[in-house]
Every structure is written in C-alpha cells, then in structure tokens.
Amino acid sequence: MKPTTLDAYQLMHEGALALADVEEAGIRIDVERLDQTIADIDVVIDGLYSQLQNDKVWYSWKERWGEKSNLGSRYQLGKVLFEELGYKAKKLTPTGRAQVNEEALTQINLSFVKNYLRIEKLKKLRTTYLLGIRREVVGEYLHAFFNLHLARTMRSSASEPNLQNIPIRDTEAGRLIRSCIIPRDGHTLVEIDYSSLEYRVCACFYQDENMLAYVADPTSDVHRDVAAELFMLDQDDVSKDLRFYAKNQFVFATLYGSYYVNTSKNLWNEAVLGASVTTSGGVPIRKHLASKGIKQLGMCKPGHTALKGTFERHVKQVEERFKERFPQWAERKEIWWQRYLSSGSFQMMTGFSCSGVFTRNDLYNYPIQGPAFHLLLWSLIQMVKWLKDEGMKSVVVAEVHDSLLIDVENSELDDVIAKAKQVMTKDVQDHWRWAARVPLEVEVEASEKNWYEKKPWKG
DNA sequence: CACTGGAGCCAC
DNA sequence: AAACGTGGCTCCAGTG
C-alpha cells in the first residue's frame, strides 16, 4: 500500500499525529465503579463455579480427566459431552475437532452447560474488558492505542486495550463496561456516527444508479426492501430484527463476495431457527415461511443444485434479483477484478495504490472499507486541529471506524457538534469530490453520565 | 520458560 | 470461477 498523491501521504502523516493527540488526551474511567464491578462479578462467578462442582457432569469430567481436569478447558468439556455423556457433535472445527462454542452448547439441555455458558460470558467480560481496561489506567485516564499501520485495508486498529470492540449488542455486558467510561467533570461524552457509511461509499465506488438512488431518497431503505424479499413479507411486516439479519447476512455479505449457498444457510440458522425472530405482526418467521411453502433450508452444498421449495433456492432467486436491482454494481465488480488480474494492483479512491496478491473478495472489500474509514480519519484530523487552534477544552478521545467519541466541555456542546456535522458531512465532500455523489449523514448521541447512557442528542 | 496456533468471542 | 471483510484479546494445548 503506497500513497500516490500528496493528499494521501498527508492523510496518514497528519492522521498519525492526530491520533497521537487522541491517545495523549485519554479517556476518563470511573475507577471506583470499575473496581466494584470486577468485585461483584467475581462473587457471581465464584457462586456459579461452586454449582458446577456439585454437578454430576463434573464427576464425569473428573473421571475422564483426573488430575488434569480444568473447568476452563472447552476441549475437555467437548470430550466429556461428546465422548462420555453421549451427546452428538453437530459441527467440527477446521482441524476436525468438535465445536464447543455457544451455538453447540445451547443445544445441550443440561443445567451444568447452562451455567458453564454463563460463566464463560462473565469471564470474557471480566478478563478482556474490565481487567483489560483496569490494567492500563493511569490516574483516572486510559491512554489506549489507535494504529494506522496494521490493517491491510488501511483502516485503523486499536489495542491495549482495544477500544473498538467494547460490547454494545449484549445490553448487560455493554452496561457493565461502558458505564465505567465517563466524561471529564463539566463535560459530556458525545458520539458522532456516520449513518450507513460503508453502503454509501460502496454506492460512490460503483456509481450504481439504484444504489445511489437508495441513499438519495431518505424514505427508501435497501435493507428493508431486501428483507421483504428474503422473508416473503410486505414492507410493513419487516421487523427490526429481520431487517438486521437481511442487512448483515445478505446485503453486506453479498456485496463483499458471499453467495446464496452461504447466505441462505446463515440466514436460516440465525434468523429463522435462531433467537425467536418474528415479523412485525409477531408471527414467528419460521411459521411464516412455512405458510409460504418453505419448510426446509436445502443442502447448501457448493456444486449442487438448490432444490425447488427450499430456502436455499429462494435466496438464490433473491440474489439474482439483487444483481438486477444493482446492474452497474454487478457489471463493474467483474471489470474491477479483471483489471486487477491484468495489472496486479488497484487504486483506492483516497489515493493509495495497493499491489500484491489479493483474493477476489479482497478486491470487493478493501476499496470500500479503506476509503470509508478515511472519511472518518480526515474528519478526525480536522476536529483535533480545530479544537486545538480554537483553544477549546473539548477533546477527541476515541474513534471506532465510522464514529468519533468526543469529550465535550458543556459550554462548547453546540459549537463542537455543529462543527463535527459540518466537517463530517460537508467539508469532507469538498476534499474528496467522489464522496459528494451521495448525501453524508451523522447521528449524534450524548451522555453526561457515561458511554452506556448515551441518548440521541436533541440540540 | 517462551512462543505459537487453534478456538472462541467482542466490535465495525 | 470462488464463495463476506477487517481487527484484538484470552485461554488452552503443544513444542522445543
């Protein structure tokens, strides 16, 4: 990866300097609360552990493993469940071992296993996040790292600890950890996220008419429309959950090179069979699909015909319509790949030349993921500079690929938010004209308490 | 004892 | 024709 323009060089140079300022500023931690949370979780984990040790399964475990018995070993648990207690391993890891992950374990109806999963969740939360943060706190500030030289796509990465993967989807974990991350006194934590940034960059990159049209029309919603097709529903019956699965398991998966054999399987396992997903009318999606004649997934084997009446066949047809819906995308992604094959390199819209050995899917992903982050990075640079030049008390404290976290002094709230909106949605389009092919939008959330309590900002 | 790869799980 | 991408961290198991 090489910059081919002065602008691209400066993006990395100034980006590294700006991120150094972010690291130096640090993010404030409620250390007392953090320590209390760790202590509370320890008590819960200890309680659950003693339950496990009074369970029959633990006796089988000790018979099998003797002195080596270790409750922390999933490998040992797998051997006990699948070789001693007669449960069937349904999936194997790439090296041929039985999978002993959450998906496999939730299918086993034993209170031991239920407790085990609960402990594992809490342990992850405790060691990776709570202790991970605790270890790095100096005074009451955490100075984590933001790197620009590690990700192959020219995204950033974060470490020690990784502030870019703090739980949020699991509300309990999100609350326990994020509520320890707080604003400075007299400040408010403000998070500004780009709305559907990668999709918009994708539309700019392929210049597909319908992709652009979807973004231009705020009443339209590609994920909702595709969900309606995938689950054979009217648009009004597409629930938030179904939209979520359509977006992540089909739209993005397909744009980044997956296809119906895999997307149908994932949708079926997670949306149809998984976590009791319903239509917005409350009908379980599995029941709804059955009423439409789709009761089976299909074989989902590469090279095999997807049989009529299966979900696999249906998703194959939705995929065909997806290509018809976005014809320039379908055509240009092939040309894009062929051009790489003959030249051995490709060019990012932000001015970086990438040469080397890449897979087809790399070619689909990198030119979207990299430039999408570059919009955020350019905005971060402007914000850091501006806050410094204006002598403001607010500081940028973190960045998560498409969002900025700013610790804003309360009297500066309106100015900082207005400036961030201007920079992120307008100025960046003056800087890179390709980004003006779509409207850019941001969502602003804020909390005076902590990162968990953030609520939509109403200026 | 240091190190590595596998497996798992968290984010975008 | 191939078959969603990028990261970081932890624990275990195996190696030398």
Image (cartoon, coloured by chain):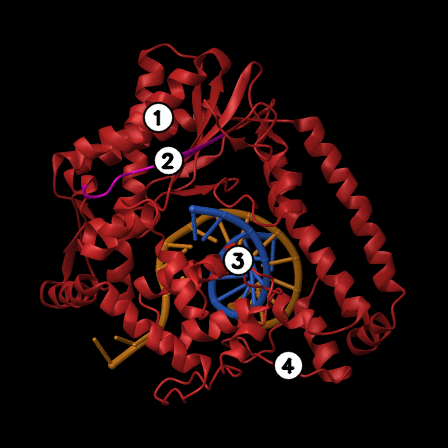
Chain colours: A red, B blue, C orange
Nearer the observer: mark 4 or 1; the answer is 1
Give the extent of the magenta segment. Answer: A437-445
From mark 2 to mark 3, how far is it between C-alphas? 22 Å
Across and down, in percent, residue A5 comes to: 12, 39
Secondary structure beneath dot 3 equals: helix
Kindly identify the amino acid type of the residue bearing the numbered disc 3: Asp
- Left or right: residue A171 versus residue A244 is right
What chain does badge 1 belong to?
A: A
**A248, A406: nearer the viewer:** A248
From mark 2 to mark 1, how far is it between C-alphas? 9 Å
Question: What residue sits right under mark 2 in the picture?
Answer: A442
Q: Are marks 2 and 4 on the same chain?
A: yes
What chain does badge 4 belong to?
A: A
Across and down, in percent, residue A248 comes to: 43, 59
The answer to if A439 sits in the magenta stretch is yes
Q: Is residue C1 above or below residue A272?
A: below
Secondary structure beneath dot 1 equals: helix
Q: In the rendered structure, which disc, 2 or 3, sits on the residue that comes first in sequence?
A: 3
Q: In the rendered structure, which disc, 2 or 4, sits on the residue that comes first in sequence?
A: 4
Q: Is residue A320 above or below residue A71?
A: below
From mark 1 to mark 3, how far is it between C-alphas? 31 Å
Say whether residue A126 is visible: yes
Q: Give the label on residue A420, or none.
A: 1
